[in-house]
Image (tube, rainbow, N blue to C red):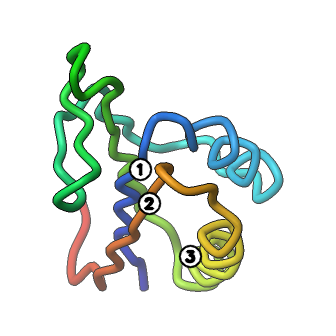
């Protein structure tokens, strides 16, 4: 079985996520860059002078065991993010893939 993992993150977290991918030997993923987002009333990444920065989304399809290993590391990373840098992860089972 497989899981789809979507990691929505502030661009400031990209290198740390990529380091985890390297540690876990994850080489296949989709990265949707420069997504404009509003995280909360005070945190907006719209790519403008008023709201600088953008967000991005990694999309991965991983076997369950590999997915669980990645999830553990991402949870640990999220605990240590500095204020203003955010990330959330969506995990879904994959019924079919071809």
Answer whether labels 1 and 2 touch (C-beta < 8 Å): yes
How far apart marks 3 and 1 lie (CA) works out to: 18 Å
Whether residue 91 is situated above or below residue 26 in the rendered picture: below
- Residue 87 is tagged as 2
Closer to the eye: label 3 or 2: 2
Q: Residue lying furthest right in this view?
A: 23
Q: Kindly identify the residue that appears in the image at 30 percent across and 85 percent down.
A: 93
Mark drawn on residue 67: 3
Residue 51: image location, x then y, percent: 24, 28
Residue identifier under label 1: 9
**Residue shown at 59% from the left, 69% from the top:** 78
**Regarding mark 2 in the picture, which secondary structure is present there?**
strand
Using the image, determine if residue 40 lies above or below residue 63: above
Residue 75 as seen in the image, left or right of residue 90? right
The local secondary structure at tag 1 comes to strand
| Near-viewer residue (32 or 43) | 43
Indicate which disc, 3 or 2, sits on the residue closer to the N terminus: 3
Looking at the image, residue 27 sits to the left or right of residue 9; the answer is right
Which quadrant does the N terminus fall into?
Answer: bottom left
Quarter of the image for residue 20 reads bottom right
Looking at the rendered image, the disc whose residue lies closer to the viewer, 3 or 1, is: 1
The answer to whether residue 91 is above or below residue 38 is below
Q: Under tag 3, what secondary structure?
A: helix
- On the image, the x and y values in percent for residue 28 come to 52, 43
Please identify the quarter of the rendering in which residue 46 is found.
top left
Q: Which of the two residues, 55 or 85, is positioned nearer the viewer here?
A: 85
């Amino acid at each position: 079985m497989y899981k789809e993992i979507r990691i929505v993150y502030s661009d400031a977290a990209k290198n740390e996520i990529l380091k985890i991918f390297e540690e876990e030997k994850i080489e296949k993923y989709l990265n949707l860059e420069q997504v404009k987002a509003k995280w909360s009333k005070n945190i907006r990444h719209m790519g403008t002078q008023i709201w600088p920065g953008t967000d991005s989304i990694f999309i991965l399809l991983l076997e369950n065991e590999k997915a669980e290993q990645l999830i553990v590391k991402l949870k640990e990373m999220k605990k240590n993010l500095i204020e203003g840098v955010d990330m959330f992860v969506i995990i879904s089972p994959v019924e079919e893939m071809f």
